[in-house]
């Protein structure tokens, strides 16, 4: 069992009410945009038919997904053509933490994970 499987074992996919997950686009066509993941515990990224449209030709139709299992946040590549990178390392699935940087195509996003009051 890999570390991601161990971390989510027995947990339901749910975004807790006391957690706020934000993403800020630092580089790429959509640089400057920021958004909050709210209400959904699974959010896809890609060029078409994704929850978050990324207007970058280097991004696959469905490129990657962020899944939230209560206090555990996971980034998964969806067999994209150019790969998904977390802090400059290509990944298949990996745990996310505050301030991590995700690169898909030429787009770089920074993750912000906060507990709300």
Image (cartoon, rainbow, N blue to C red):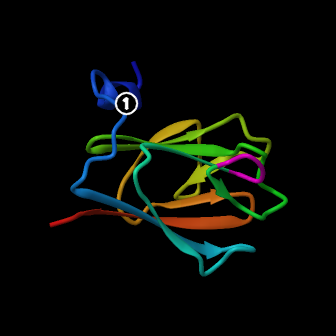
Q: Position of residue 37 (x, y in %)?
A: 44, 58
Q: Main secondary structure of the magenta part?
A: loop
Between residue 49 and residue 61, name the one nearer to us. 49
- Assess disc 1: are there few (<14), some (14-19) or many (≥20) residues with their C-alpha within 10 Å of its C-alpha: few
Q: Quadrant of residue 68?
A: top left
Question: From the viewer's perspective, is residue 95 above or below residue 35?
Answer: above
Residue 88 at x, y = what percent?
Answer: 58, 57
Where is residue 7 shown, x and y percent of the image?
A: 31, 31
Residue at the spot of label 1: 3
Q: Residue at x 26, y 47 (%)?
A: 16
Which residue sits at x=41%, y=56%?
Answer: 38
Q: Quadrant of the C terminus?
A: bottom left
Q: Does the segment drawn in magenta span residue 81? A: no
Residue most toward the left?
117
Q: Residue furthest right?
A: 57
Q: Which residues are magenta?
A: 46-50
Observer-nearest of 107 and 66: 66
- Residue shown at 59% from the left, 76% from the top: 33
Residue 109 location, quadrant? bottom right
Q: Quadrant of the N terminus?
A: top left
Q: Position of residue 104 (x, y in %)?
A: 68, 56
- Number of labels in the image equals 1
Residue under the image location 69 percent in, 45 percent down: 63
Q: In the shown orientation, is residue 41 left or right of residue 59?
A: left
Badge 1 marks a residue whose secondary structure is: helix
Q: Relative to 16, does residue 33 appear above or below in the rendering?
A: below
Residue 72 horizontal side relative to residue 48, left or right: left
Q: Is 48 included in the stretch rendered in magenta?
A: yes
Residue at the outermost top position: 1
Based on the displayed image, in which of its 4 quarters is residue 57 positioned?
bottom right
């Amino acid at each position: 069992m890999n570390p991601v499987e161990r971390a989510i074992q027995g947990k339901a996919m749910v975004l807790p009410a006391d957690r706020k997950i934000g993403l800020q686009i630092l580089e790429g066509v959509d640089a400057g945009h920021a958004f909050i993941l709210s209400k959904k515990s699974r959010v896809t990224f890609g060029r078409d038919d994704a929850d978050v449209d990324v207007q970058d030709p280097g991004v696959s139709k469905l490129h990657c997904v962020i899944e939230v299992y209560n206090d555990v946040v996971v980034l998964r590549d969806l067999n994209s053509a150019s790969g998904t990178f977390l802090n400059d390392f290509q990944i298949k699935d990996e745990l996310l933490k505050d301030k991590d940087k995700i690169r898909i195509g030429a787009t770089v996003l920074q993750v912000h994970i906060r507990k709300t009051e």
